[in-house]
């Protein structure tokens, strides 16, 4: 698993790649929760390079969304591969999280500007 | 899909699960298991083995989990057995998928995935071992 972090205006963009599983989810969890603690409220998690996620990883997305909601923040996920999207749908996350096709869509959903072409 | 079977002995360690998944992927490729079915088997194995590693033992030294995947003409059968404490994953209450975000529980996600991905799941406690048999039809 690899995590990259960038900022575009008020929006914090995390790019997560490869395998998010029981052995790696703790690192992802402390990263995401640390950012919320630091005051980030608009967060995109770009899953374009995420190949695999299990329930330990899914739990981190749920935890992040649950933490952000009462703070007036918002989490948007983008660019999920079909196999990963299927898992998010199976677990019912597509009902409670905003999932969009691209990073541009995610930035728009958070009221920011689309990334320069 | 070609018929065949593979048995993998897994030490009780979360880091071993990726190795298990690699071995199962190789088996799947060799036996021409459709990629969606292979993905489902690997995720289900991951969830079950993760649970056993996390909660199955007070002292896991020298213990191992045995995973067996069998490809038949139209079915994949996966059996996971472990000598850990008795645990029937089918007893876990399913998460309420209709609950609003604030009320969604953090637990039970893995077992729900396994139930969704597999066609049938059977649990037995035999000779001091948990034996979970999962079947997935493959056309």
Image (cartoon, rainbow, N blue to C red):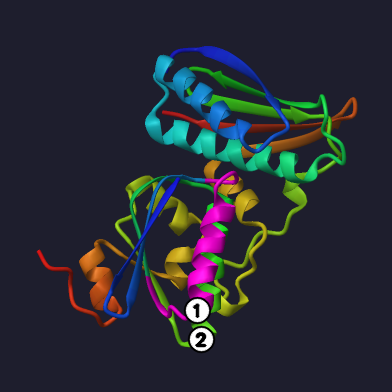
Placement of B82 over or under A32, stated as above or below: above
Relative to the observer, which residue lies in front, B17 or B97? Answer: B17
Residue B23, percent from left and from top: 52, 22
Of the 4 image quadrants, the one containing the N terminus of chain B is: top left
Seen in the image, is B33 located left or right of residue B101? left
Which element type, helix, strand or loop, lies under badge 2? helix
SS at mark 1 in the image: helix
Q: Are marks 2 and 1 on the same chain?
A: yes
Tag 2 residue: A71
Horizontally, residue A99 falls left or right of residue B31, namely left
Residue A79 shown in magenta: no
Residue B129 picture quarter: top right
Instruction: Answer with left or right where residue A85 lies relative to residue B49.
Output: left
Q: Position of residue B87 (x, y in %)?
A: 81, 43
* Vertical arrangement, residue B48 with respect to residue B30, above or below: below
Look at 82% across and 33% down and name the residue there: B60
Which residue appears at 66% of the width and 57% of the height?
B108
Q: Which residue is mark 1?
A: A68
**Residue A94 shows in this picture:** yes
B85 lies above or below B69: below
Residue extent of the magenta highlight: A21-43
How far separated are the C-alphas under marks 2 and 1?
5 Å
The answer to whether the residues at label 2 and label 1 have Cβ atoms under 8 Å apart is yes
């Amino acid at each position: 698993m690899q995590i990259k972090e960038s900022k575009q205006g008020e929006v914090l963009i995390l790019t997560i790649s490869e395998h998010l599983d029981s052995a790696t989810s703790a690192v992802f969890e402390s990263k995401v929760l640390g950012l919320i603690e630091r005051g980030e409220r608009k967060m995109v998690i770009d899953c374009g390079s995420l190949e695999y996620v299990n329930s330990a990883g899914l739990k981190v997305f749920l935890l992040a969304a649950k933490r952000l909601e009462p703070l007036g923040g918002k989490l948007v996920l983008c660019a999920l591969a079909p196999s990963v999207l299927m898992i998010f749908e199976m677990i019912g996350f597509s009902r409670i999280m905003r999932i969009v096709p691209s990073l541009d869509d995610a930035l728009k959903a958070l009221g920011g500007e689309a990334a320069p072409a | 899909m070609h018929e065949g079977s593979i048995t993998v002995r897994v030490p009780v360690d979360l880091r071993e699960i990726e190795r298990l998944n690699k071995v199962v992927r190789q088996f799947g490729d060799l036996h021409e298991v459709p990629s969606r079915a292979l993905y489902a088997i690997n995720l289900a194995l991951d969830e079950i083995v993760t649970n056993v590693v996390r909660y199955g033992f007070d002292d896991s030294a020298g213990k191992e989990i045995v995973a067996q995947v069998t490809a038949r003409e139209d079915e994949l059968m996966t059996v996971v057995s472990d000598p850990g404490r008795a645990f029937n994953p089918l007893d876990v209450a399913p998460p309420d998928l209709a609950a609003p975000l604030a009320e969604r529980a953090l637990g039970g996600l893995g077992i729900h995935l396994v139930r969704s991905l597999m066609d049938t799941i059977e649990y037995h406690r035999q000779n001091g071992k948990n034996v979970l048999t999962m079947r997935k039809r493959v056309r």
